[in-house]
Amino acid sequence: MIHIAVDAMGGDNAPESNVKGAVLALNENEDIKITLIGKEKQISKILKDQKYDYKRLNIMNATETIETGDEPAKAVLKKKDSSLVLGMKMLKNKEADAFVSAGSSGAILVGGQIIAGYAGNVRRAPLVVEMPTMKGYSLLLDCGANVDAKPEYLVQFAVMGSIYAKYILGVENPTVGLLNIGTEEYKGNSLTRETYPLLKDCDKINFVGNVEAREITEGTCDVFVCDAFAGNIALKMFEGTAKTLLKMIKGSLMTSFKGKLGGLLIKPSLKSLISKVDASEHGGAPLLGLSGLVMKAHGNSTEKQIKYAILQCIDFKKNDLSDKIEKALAK
Amino acid sequence: MIHIAVDAMGGDNAPESNVKGAVLALNENEDIKITLIGKEKQISKILKDQKYDYKRLNIMNATETIETGDEPAKAVLKKKDSSLVLGMKMLKNKEADAFVSAGSSGAILVGGQIIAGYAGNVRRAPLVVEMPTMKGYSLLLDCGANVDAKPEYLVQFAVMGSIYAKYILGVENPTVGLLNIGTEEYKGNSLTRETYPLLKDCDKINFVGNVEAREITEGTCDVFVCDAFAGNIALKMFEGTAKTLLKMIKGSLMTSFKGKLGGLLIKPSLKSLISKVDASEHGGAPLLGLSGLVMKAHGNSTEKQIKYAILQCIDFKKNDLSDKIEKALAK
């Protein structure tokens, strides 16, 4: 039985979406049990109308809630009885295998690193996103956890990403590219120029060199490694461009009768494409390299997305990803 | 008469596209004269079959060529009789108003800063791209010239971008956003955190705060300021995502009869959209803040794109952009 703690209070649609999402996940998979952490009364009220296996769900009361506006580090240190802090403590104490939260990104990142703590020799925990590409999915990391990263962090990210790609995406000997502004070895800023030789010398990965951002959606590598600033720019630019482009297409079709008719005909094809591109369909982004698994769900997650984020944790636990990362990065 | 020097030898399709592009520009606009710099024999051979106003075109022989594979700084210092170095010298000596090149990006950036030199108190010259947005066009700078930038460079970029937006795009009191990974003031890496208060205090710009990368295509600001690493990631991610998405749409339409028929009907709408999105249609990206104007054209520029890059220089000269930048950044 895999035990997943769920932050009932984090996110724009909490607690309703979080609680209902947990119930959906329970009903879809019999191998999990869930602890919902948050204001007990509110959670119970929502659960009253739901049908699920009572034995696999329990509630842990949390009197405090970390808000999006709270300064992350302060909030994590002060709100000791918040759902986020209690969830991270469960990970640290091995009382849960994973913790899912749609709460404040900053607080999740700080809480994960300070409270749950790093696995073994891990120096920093990167946030990983599965990016849709021409060929399927590639991993982009770090997407938002560690700005001002050091070269040795990026090398660890490359190793963690490779393990993720191998065991979760099922890619044998995954290729790793260093996200850069040119492909030549001498290109880039001081971080990428110092990281390149370290990746080249690392025998735990299949390093293929520098790659430009346009190669991400082409899927030329299985793992794209970068610091969190670059990764976040790439991720948000992807989301923004896709959204804008689809809006523009819609708009341009509306200007002519032929376009309108064509638009109706292509609607089903576009819809399936949009759902592939829409990162939010994919539930959560894991924070790798911590004691246990932290799964960050989108702040505006619906119950369906919370369900996905919860179910996503199963593969990570079944493949013992945390242990594998700890062993790979052991000295 | 505006005098534009054109690098006949730089780029994948040189010298043919460069020479023919110059002729197209000459024939389209009577206010310019052009100096084609490169191997005289090759240039003359291509010109032989072209019709144009002979009085407004001359050739400057250059015995050397800087190749894409050359290490930029070395090439600029050693190949003193290359088309690129000669063009930059013309700018420095005020013998030309602008220099257009589709050659090695690295060499253009190095040559511009070392040979042409900065205008007045300019500390670094940013590469500027006009990004297509939901609302029209916004400026993204720096897109590739200065990695490892300092906060004071970014402030200068903001001022230069504002002048560009005002006089070239015709935006009154253009808004400036600092490209970042969150909108709160405390978000970001050390560079953006140190830059934020400087931008806030700068009375020469209309600073609106931090903006995320997804806002670029939404066009929420007129000017997006960042260091060259982040800017290049954003630009390439934009190009890659747009290209991939359009390919995916095409692919998904081909899977059904309805899709195929719909695809035929929407073709004209899509085509005009693609040309809006396709950055390469826009000719060149200016390198601002130098003595004279350096206009970087795409490496794979066609003659049409070279023509656009040349014609783009006219507005910059007519509006005395270099002088305005120099004055705005005077101590």
Image (tube, coloured by chain):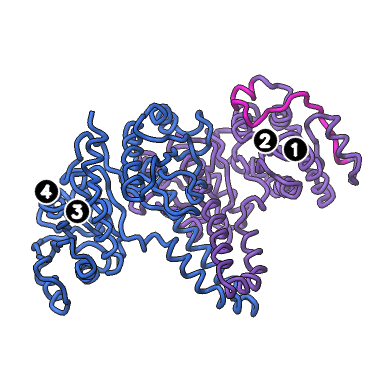
Chain colours: A purple, B blue
**Which residue is located at x 51 percent, y 28 percent?**
B186
Q: Tell me the crowding category of disc 2: few under 14, some 14 to 19, or many 20 or more residues within 10 angstroms, Cα based.
A: many
**Amino acid tagged 1:** Ala
Task: Say which of marks 1 and 4 sits in front.
Answer: 4
**Which residue is located at x 36 percent, y 46 percent?**
B165
Whole-percent x and y of residue A177? 45, 52
Q: Mark 3 lies on which chain?
A: B
Which residue carries the number 1 mark?
A: A14
Asked if the residues shown at circle 2 and circle 1 are in contact, with their CB atoms under 8 angstroms apart, the answer is yes
Whole-percent x and y of residue A196? 39, 45
Which residue carries the number 2 mark?
A: A103
- Count the labels in the image: 4
**Which residue is located at x 39 percent, y 26 percent?**
B201
Asked if the residues shown at circle 2 and circle 3 are in contact, with their CB atoms under 8 angstroms apart, the answer is no
> Is circle 2 on the same chain as circle 1?
yes
User: Residue B65, located in which quarter of the rendered image?
Assistant: bottom left
**Which label belongs to residue B293?**
none
Which residue carries the number 3 mark?
A: B98
**Amino acid tagged 2:** Gly
Quote the CA–CA distance across marks 4 and 3: 9 Å
Whether A42 is drawn above or below B73: the answer is above
Residue A287 visible in image: yes
Quote the CA–CA distance across marks 1 and 4: 64 Å
Highlighted range, magenta:
A56-77
Q: Tell me the crowding category of disc 4: few under 14, some 14 to 19, or many 20 or more residues within 10 angstroms, Cα based.
A: some
Whether B249 is drawn above or below B189: the answer is below
